[in-house]
Image: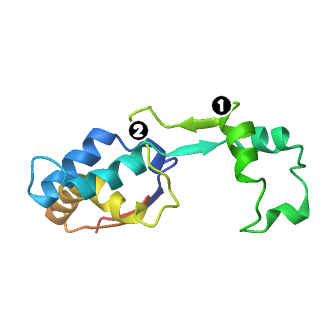
Amino acid sequence: MLCYDVENFFDRFDHQILKKNWCDLLQNTQLPPDHYKVYKSLTRFASVDKEELYKELGLSLNSKTLHKRYEVLCSSKDFRDRIRGKRLINVNKSGKGIPQGSPISGLLSNVYMIEFDKEVNSYLAQLGGKYFRYSDDMIFIIV
């Protein structure tokens, strides 16, 4: 039995493979407009480095009061002027990766890995083995 947890799994998704597999699953040559909007939002996601954000806002990374899940760090105006205005927002233009924590990430891992899953499952079945995967966690059992 072999068990793997793939490091940086979601960060490595090739956008073209994801899009192709998604289209194949829908039996279409291109994504419908609503699907494409979801695809685009997940592949061109944006983030702000926490240390740069806190530094710009004059906040301490060690503050216990800022670690609440829904704490508002700044006003909309501060965000526009100080965060967006100083170009602290990083948009993913790498052609790889989706955010791990989105509600649809688990589903997209299945879409992304569909061909791999078929090949590995088929190969191990010939050997009398089994293959299981949940997102980036894989188990290979060979008897």
Left of 42 or right of it: where is 141? left
Q: Is residue 21 left or right of residue 43?
A: left
The residue sitting at 91% across, 58% down in the picture is 63
Question: What kind of element bears circle 1?
Answer: loop
> At numbered mark 2, what does the secondary structure look like: helix, strand or loop?
loop
Q: Which label sits on residue 87?
A: 1
Residue at screen point 41% across, 50% down:
41
Q: Position of residue 65 (x, y in %)?
A: 88, 65
Q: Foreground: 83 or 4?
A: 83
Which amino acid type corresponds to the residue marked 2 in the rendered image?
Lys
User: Residue 100, position in %: x, y?
Assistant: 50, 56
Q: In this view, does 92 lie to the left or right of 53?
A: left
In the rendered image, the quadrant that contains the C terminus is bottom left
How many residues crowd mark 1 within 10 Å: few (<14), some (14–19), many (20+)?
few
Q: Residue furthest front?
A: 77
Q: In the rendered view, how is the structure colored?
A: rainbow
In percent of width and height, residue 58 lies at 89, 43
Q: How far apart are marks 2 and 1 (CA)?
A: 21 Å
> What mark, if any, has residue 3 been given in the picture?
none
Question: Is residue 3 visible to us here?
Answer: yes
Could you tell which of marks 2 and 1 lies nearer the N-terminus? 1
Assign the N terminus to one quadrant of the image. bottom left
Residue occupying the point 31% across, 61% down: 110
Q: Where is residue 2 in the image (x, y as percent from the top left)?
A: 41, 60
Query: Mark 2 touching mark 1, by CB under 8 A?
Result: no
Up the image or down, 84 lies above or below 103; here it is above
Q: Which of 131 and 70 is in front in this view?
A: 70
Amino acid carrying mark 1 in the image: Arg
Using the image as rendered, state which of residue 70 and residue 118 is in the foreground. Answer: 70
Q: Mark 2 points at which residue?
A: 96
Within 10 angstroms of label 2, few (less than 14), some, or many (20 or more) residues? some
Res 124 → quadrant: bottom left
